Amino acid sequence: ARVREKMKRAKKVENELEKANANSVKMENTLRQENEGLKMSVSDLTIKLKAAKTQEEKHEVEGGDMNVEMGNLRSKIKVLGSENVKKDTKIRENERRKLEN
C-alpha cells in the first residue's frame, strides 16, 4: 500500500513537472515572438528614421536653393532700383533743361 501511495505521489509530481515544463515552453515561445516583434518594430523605426533624415536633408537643400534664389531676386531688385533712379535722374535733368531753355 505504501509503495502504491509513493507511486501515485511520484506520478502526480511527474505530471506537475510536465505541466510546468509545458508552461515554460509556452512562455519561452511567447517571449521569442515578442522579441521578434520588437526587432521588427526597431527595424521599422530605423527605416522611418532614415526616411525622415533623407527628407530633412532634402529640405535643407531646398532651403539652400531658396536662399540663393532670394539672393538673386534681391540683386535684381537692387539693379532695377538703381536703373529707376538713373532714369528718374535723367528725366529730372531733361525737365530742368527744358525749364531753363
Image (spheres, rainbow, N blue to C red):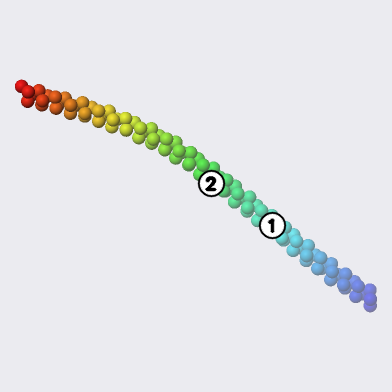
Q: Quadrant of residue 49?
A: top right
Of the image marks 2 and 1, the number of the one nearer the N terminus: 1
Mark-to-mark CA distance, 2 and 1: 25 Å
| Residue at the right extreme, as displayed | 2
Q: Which residue in the structure is indicated by mark 2? A: 48
Residue 31 sits in which quadrant?
bottom right
Image quadrant where residue 30 sits: bottom right
Name the spot of residue 57 as percent of width and height, x first.
48, 38
| Crowd band around label 2 with a 10 angstrom C-alpha radius: few (<14), some (14–19), many (20+) | few
Q: Secondary structure at mark 2?
A: helix
Q: Name the quarter where the C terminus is drawn.
A: top left
Observer-nearest residue: 53 or 26?
53
Residue at (66, 53) in percent of width and height:
35
- Label 2 close to label 1 by CB (< 8 Å): no
Q: Nearer the viewer, residue 92 or 28?
A: 92
Which residue reaches farthest front? Answer: 100
Question: Which residue has dot 1 on it?
Answer: 31
Task: Name the quadrant of the N terminus.
Answer: bottom right
Q: In the rendering, at what x and y percent does residue 58 appear?
A: 46, 38
Residue situated furthest left in the rendering: 101
Question: Would you place residue 6 above or below residue 42 in this image?
Answer: below
Instruction: Report the residue at 78% width, 62% height from top.
Output: 21
- Mark 1 belongs to which amino acid? Leu
Q: Residue at x 65, y 56 (%)?
A: 34
